[in-house]
Amino acid sequence: MKKEIGWIENIKHATRVKHLPVVFSKRETMKIFEHFEGIPKLVVSLLYGSGLRLSECLNLRIKDIDFDYKQIMVRDGKGEKDRHSVLPTTIIPELKRHLNEVYKRHKKDSANGKGETVLPYALKRKYPNAGKEFGWQFVFPADKFIKEKESSLIFRFHIHESTIQRAVKEAIRKAGVNKPGSPHTFRHSFATHLLGNGADIRTIQELLGHNSVKTTMIYTHVLNRGLGVKSPLD
């Protein structure tokens, strides 16, 4: 058309609609937990008891769990940040039994020449034998082996996220909880219930790994604390 467009002015950035997160009540949480067992129960216990994201939980290595200090080291969380979170005391006996089974399987794999796992970044070059150590194994290893294309290493990766996602959906259905929950809902519930119990907002921010306390403040709205009023019907 051969027309000059000129400067485009008064353009505003598109903003996403902010939704409050779905949160289970404590009663709903316990009701849902009744329908978990085995590995899904352990994984969801860490999502709710430690506030982990599902990916962070499945990427845990044996060495990241400290039973003495009752804490978990989350490495390369969102934003490639490391942080500590609390290890729930109630799951320690069951978690130790699980890790004992992982140890037995690792020993068996090692005897068959397949006990090595993949290492993050360039640690393979820095520590050539670290991948064979038990501490570097995944806390929740998969049942089957996969092959890494670059190195041709045959190893056990962690279980797939869909395994836990399906288990959570099924548990919510069986519990009769009419909320659109997912594994991430347990992380939201962790923060909301801590806040409801009087935990400091800054502490919750650190446990969740949020950059800004403004992100963590959304849970105050879930609790209705920001309103500061009671319904006239109450």
Image (cartoon, rainbow, N blue to C red):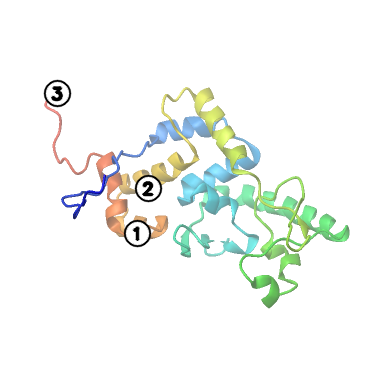
- In the image, 124 versus 92, the foreground residue is 124
- Outermost residue on the right side: it is 112
Q: Secondary structure at mark 3?
A: loop
Nearest to viewer (mark 3 / mark 2): 2
The relative height of residue 81 versus residue 177 in the rendered view (above or below) is: below
Task: Answer with mark 1 or mark 2, whichever residue precedes in sequence.
Answer: 2
Residue named by callout 1: 203
Q: Amino acid at mark 1?
A: Thr
Above or below, 117 against 158 in this view is below
The reply to whether residue 169 is visible in this rendering is yes
Question: Where residue 102 sits: x, y (%)?
Answer: 73, 53
Residue position for label 3: 233
* Residue situated in front as seen by the camera: 121 or 201: 121
Give the residue type that dot 3 points to. Answer: Leu
Residue at the left extreme of this rendering: 232
Residue at (44%, 25%) from the top-left corner? 177
The location of residue 138, given as percent across then percent down, is 66, 56
**Number of callouts in the render?**
3
Would residue 84 be found to the left or right of residue 113 on screen? left
As drawn, the residue found furthest toward the bottom would be: 126
Q: Quadrant of the C terminus?
A: top left
Q: Which mark is residue 191?
A: 2
Relative horizontal placement of residue 234, taking residue 25 as reference (left or right): left
Q: CA distance from mark 3 to mark 2?
A: 29 Å
Is disc 1 placed on a helix, strand or loop? helix
What's under tag 2, amino acid-wise?
Answer: Ala
Circles 3 and 1 in contact, beta carbons < 8 Å: no
